[in-house]
Amino acid sequence: MKLDIIKNQWLDIVFEGRNKIYGAYELRKSNGKTTVKALVIGSLIFSFAVAAPLIASFLPDSEEEVVNNDIKIATVKLPPKKKEEIKPNQPPPPPPPPKVDQVKFVKPVVAKAEEVTEDPPKIVDLKDKKVGAETIKGDPDAVLTVDEPVGKGPVQEVIQEDNTVYNTAGIEVKPDFPGGIEKFYKFVGNNYKTPEEEGLKGKVYVTFVVEKDGSLTDIKVLRDIGYGTGAEAIRVLKKCPKWTPGEQNGKKVRVLYSLPITIQSAE
């Protein structure tokens, strides 16, 4: 015989010969009804929860405002626009008073005594005052203006000094050491002290500017071989006598000069 576990037949088999009044038997016997009842109640609660927003949308809103569409429009008669009065051309305001008092100038004419209507001003009245077409009281706080034209005297030409540093390649008259460039090389060789370093050899490259007065300035070491060889070259050039300056367009100018110094220590 097949046993259907869905139905309660298996309970009788399990509890055969046992005390069926025991609570476990009654609970298992009524378990199917309890399960169906719980499923139905749960389904109803779930359906109500899902349909609640839809039901609420069909209910009338008690707080909806009542809009009054009865609007009355009344016409108002506006006053007429005033026409703008066109003002006639007004004269410009009078000029401010001058800083110095002005005395009216009366042109002297030959006339009879009874025909003279206005006496010319006295010399005392014209002291520290200007002469004009009318008498005006001066304002001490006014800005002083000068009406005198600019003079046409001789103008002194300002010549700007040429401080350009020229290169020896494009200069008309090159700077020169007293006695010639060979004597300059001899001067450097006699005064240059070679470091006492065995096997030291190489070249020191130095540049300097021969000024308009023949002095040497802006002495720079472009490359040395160490052991104070560059500093020694600067020392020798600083004690060098003045050169004959270079010239360009007939005027003394500043010229850049470069000097390579070959060093070879005694072995």
Image: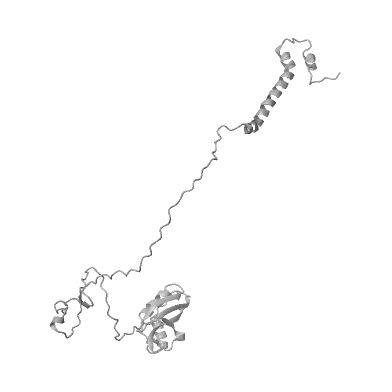
Residue 245 to residue 27: above or below:
below
Q: Residue 111, located in which quarter of the rendered image?
A: bottom left
Answer left or right for 45 relative to 228. Answer: right
Could you tell me residue 137's position as x and y percent? 20, 71
List x then y, in percent, for residue 9. 80, 16
Judging depth in this view, the residue of 146 and 137 nearest the camera is: 137
**Residue displayed at 13% across by 81% down:** 114
Q: Nearer the viewer, residue 4 or 123?
A: 123
In what quadrant of the picture does the N terminus appear?
Answer: top right
> Image quarter for residue 154?
bottom left
At 45% from the left and 75% from the top, the residue drawn is: 222
- Residue 208 seen in this snapshot: yes
- Which residue is most to the right? 1
Q: How is the image coloured?
A: one colour
Residue 217 quadrant: bottom left
Q: Is residue 256 visible?
A: no
Marks counted in the figure total 0
* Vertical placement of residue 22 versus 163, above or below: above
In the rendered structure, the answer to whether residue 77 lies left or right of residue 70 reads left
The percent position of residue 160, horizontal first and vertical second, equals 36, 82
Considering depth in this image, is 180 or 80 the residue closer to the camera?
80
Left or right: residue 40 compared with residue 92: right
